């Protein structure tokens, strides 16, 4: 398929793989974190690791939006959805995320009306079609999805749709990266920067990673060759002793981001003083809520929600996995008590979650099985 | 502190868990249980099989193979609840006939007779019903079978979605081939009969919830004549076939790999797919290997007969785009691996729950 196959060329991949290997010091082990869950998915979906030498390890970071949703927030969503007059809408990935009291799928089986949508605008359409019901959009995601939620709120206000509201769980990427960099047991050499988030926020916010922490970051696209090229750029920086922010995804990411998207977000959202992240704990100024101008559309104000903090299950080591301290398989419950069918931690739910990706695709990655058929 | 276990040990632990008969642990049935992946397997093998326990059912083939009065026959049933009831390339009436015909066909049986039970929603337009039953008649004629028994029920408005259809079929097995996963062995080639994912994507787009326009039509079609040509071309070299419906080709490959305790390796660039299906999959994040088909089969054939099987398939319209997509290995037992188009490889496991409910 045009404009896709060009970025998946196996011949070019071999060339890049050879050049990356040439940049490696064979006696050293390199740990590179891909922050974004979309990258994790690409790595496993295409077998990107097969083109890298054994001493480059890709560590899966915290950028899977559903993986960082704490259980209490799922329970809040269920509590809203249990009201007879409510239709709760959310992205499909959210349906199976376990709360303290079951998932949205379980809530549906018990009688709630939770519907999957592909865009917040679909939720607004459902609100128009059901004027006698309250339609709530359960918003999740980083700066990638936040602008579309913001635009939907703006449109709801313009059209005066009174039965629409947003339960906002949007989070911001920089505080999460800071939390990882401040973790005492961290041992990462560099970062693959989240391409989609960067289309909105640009590359400047990552400066501190290079300047203060001395780690290279390369903003990477989502095709497998994008990732290989980005790893190449990182290895080149490491080899030359540089630590800079570079933009591999220049065909989409502007250095200054998308000013219109940022302006809309600034208008519709305000920073929460703190927000709890699954596995990472409470992080200050790391999440968005509807600003006071749009409080009418804030589901947290419209409905009484329990707002109870539910502790992560004790056995679950999602936090260590999200920080790259543990590999998925090193978690105590990985593959036994915690599987994609019966996930304990969120990393096991979404296909972008580090554990689910490893469980589904990764187990034989080391064996280099001869695959000519 | 206990000894740190190795990655290999974790892999073995997962294998052990995977082979255990799944348990049904949920309090209620959720939509995941209907999607054809692991949750469906837990429903069938964890809740239903232990209660209806018998040797024939335990085989979990597309149809049961029975020996009655000296005659070998295949016997199957299938329920159809697709929404919308009419979609590009087909409708629920046509699907209900073809689905049962194909379950018989891949079991090696010539379809002999079909029954149909219609569950109709109060208020259903007579014209709609007439159209669906006509489609059943046309599909039956095309498949060389008649609907010879039936039942109707009407339920209150809102108790079903326009109409549901349950069909049951019997077919005659006129050869002595044994077509079961136990026949599959290392070295066998894996074939698919044409482009995959067409039906599931057509249904998804037909729901009109996505604002994606693409000309993708359901592949619903009868497969018996294709199967007959393959039996004639291969004889006992034909090991096993499956109808790649709910859960798609990936689920079929996993079922066979587990049942035959073999590894299956496929090469993604050999898997036939329409560009529209690839494109929709890219946009929606859906892998066509897991998307339902309603007129495609997966066949396991001994290596020396693979070319003959391929030629026989391609000579039939239902197999015009057939392809050899991979082969069976000893290692890793119970697992499906794929060589990606990027030159890497990945594991292909069963889905937990499908994002596309009620596609058939």
Image (cartoon, coloured by chain):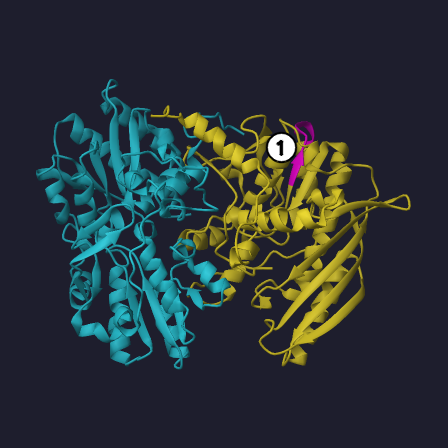
Rendered image quadrant of residue A179? top left
Which residue reaches farthest left?
A211
Q: Which chain is cyan?
A: A
Residue B116 visible at all = yes
Q: Identify residue for label 1.
A: B189
Which of B360/A305 is in front?
A305
Task: Tell me if mark 1 has few (under 14), some (14-19) or many (20+) residues whose alpha carbon lies within 10 angstroms of its own.
Answer: many
Give the chain letter at badge 1: B
- In the rendered image, residue B302 lying in the magenta stretch gets the answer yes
> In the figure, B111 relative to A366: above or below?
below
Task: Check if residue A366 falls in the magenta segment.
Answer: no
Is B110 left, or right, of A156 in this rendering? right
Q: Nearer the viewer, residue B135 or A100?
A: A100
Please name whichever residue, B247 or A196, is drawn nearer the observer in this view of the structure: B247
Above or below residue A42? Residue A98 is below
Q: Measuring 18% from the left and 68% from the top, which residue is drawn there?
A: A291
Q: Is residue A218 above or below residue A2?
A: above
Q: Can I make out residue B266 in this image?
A: no
Point out the stretch of residues depicted in magenta: B299-305
Provide residue B201's location: percent of width, then percent of height: 51, 57
* Chain painted in yellow in the figure: B
What's the residue at 52%, 33% (across, down)?
B15
From the top left corner, tell me how far across and down residue B216 is, in percent: 52, 59
């Amino acid at each position: 398929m045009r404009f896709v196959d060009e970025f998946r060329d196996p011949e070019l991949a071999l060339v890049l793989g050879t050049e990356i290997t040439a940049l490696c010091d064979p006696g050293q082990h390199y740990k590179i974190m891909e922050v974004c869950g979309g990258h994790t998915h690409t790595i496993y979906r295409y077998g990107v690791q097969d083109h890298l030498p054994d001493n480059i390890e890709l560590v899966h970071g915290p950028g899977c939006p559903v993986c960082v949703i704490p259980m209490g927030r799922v329970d809040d969503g269920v509590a809203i959805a249990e009201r007879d007059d409510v239709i709760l809408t959310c992205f499909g990935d959210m349906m199976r995320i376990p709360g303290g009291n079951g998932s949205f799928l379980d809530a549906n089986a018990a009688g709630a009306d939770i519907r999957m949508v592909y865009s917040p605008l679909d939720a607004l359409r459902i609100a128009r079609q059901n004027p006698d019901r309250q339609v709530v959009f359960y918003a999740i995601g980083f700066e990638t999805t936040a602008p579309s939620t913001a635009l939907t709120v703006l449109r709801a206000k313009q059209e005066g749709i009174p039965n629409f509201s947003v339960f906002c769980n949007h989070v911001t990427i920089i505080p999460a990266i800071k939390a990882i960099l401040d973790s005492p047991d961290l041992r990462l050499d560099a970062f693959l920067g989240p391409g989609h988030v960067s289309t909105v926020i640009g590359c400047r916010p990552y400066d501190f990673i290079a300047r203060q922490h001395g780690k290279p970051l390369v903003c990477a696209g989502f095709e497998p060759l994008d990732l290989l090229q980005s790893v190449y750029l990182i290895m080149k920086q490491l080899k030359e002793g540089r630590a800079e922010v570079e933009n591999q995804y220049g065909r989409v990411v502007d250095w200054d981001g998308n000013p219109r998207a940022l302006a809309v977000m600034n208008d519709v959202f305000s920073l929460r003083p703190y927000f709890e992240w699954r596995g990472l704990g409470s992080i200050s100024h790391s999440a968005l809520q509807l600003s006071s101008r749009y409080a009418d559309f804030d589901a947290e104000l419209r409905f009484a929600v329990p707002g109870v903090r539910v502790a992560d299950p004790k056995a679950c080591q999602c936090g260590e996995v999200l920080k790259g301290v543990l590999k998925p398989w090193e978690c105590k419950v990985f593959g036994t008590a915690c599987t994609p069918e019966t996930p304990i931690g969120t990393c096991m739910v979404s296909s972008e979650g580090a554990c689910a990706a490893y469980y589904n695709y990764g187990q034989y990655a080391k064996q280099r099985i001869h695959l000519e058929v | 502190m206990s000894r740190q276990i190795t990655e290999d040990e974790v892999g073995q632990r997962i294998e052990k868990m995977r082979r255990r008969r799944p348990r049904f642990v949920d309090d209620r049935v959720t939509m995941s249980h209907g999607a054809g992946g692991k949750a469906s397997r837990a429903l069938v093998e964890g809740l239903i099989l232990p209660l209806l326990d018998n040797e024939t059912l335990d085989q979990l083939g597309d149809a049961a193979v029975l020996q009655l009065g000296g005659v070998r026959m295949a016997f199957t049933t299938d329920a159809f609840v697709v929404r919308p009831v009419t979609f590009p390339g087909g409708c629920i009436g046509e699907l209900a006939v073809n689905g049962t015909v194909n379950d018989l066909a891949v079991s090696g049986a010539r379809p002999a007779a079909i029954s149909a039970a219609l569950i109709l929603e109060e208020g259903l337009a007579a014209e709609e019903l007439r159209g669906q039953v006509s489609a059943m008649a046309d599909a039956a004629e095309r498949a060389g079978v008649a609907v010879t028994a039936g039942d109707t029920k009407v339920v209150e408005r809102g108790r079903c979605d326009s109409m549901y259809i349950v069909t049951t079929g019997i077919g005659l097995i006129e050869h002595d081939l044994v077509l079961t996963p136990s026949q599959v062995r290392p070295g066998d080639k894996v074939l698919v009969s044409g482009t995959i994912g067409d039906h599931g994507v057509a249904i998804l787009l037909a729901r009109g919830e996505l604002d994606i326009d693409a000309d993708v039509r359901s592949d619903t079609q009868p497969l018996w004549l294709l199967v007959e040509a393959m039996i004639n071309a291969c004889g006992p070299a034909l090991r096993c076939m499956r109808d790649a419906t709910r859960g798609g080709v990936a689920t079929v490959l996993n079922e066979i790999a587990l049942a035959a305790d073999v590894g299956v390796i496929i090469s993604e660039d050999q898997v036939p797919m329409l560009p529209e299906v690839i494109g929709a999959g890219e946009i929606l994040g859906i892998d066509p290997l897991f998307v339902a088909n309603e007129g495609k089969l997966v066949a396991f054939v001994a290596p020396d007969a693979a070319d003959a099987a391929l030629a026989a398939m391609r000579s039939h319209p239902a197999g015009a785009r057939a392809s050899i997509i991979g082969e069976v290995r000893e290692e890793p037992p119970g697992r499906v691996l794929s060589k990606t188009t990027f030159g890497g490889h990945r594991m292909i496991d069963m889905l937990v729950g499908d994002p596309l409910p009620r596609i058939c």
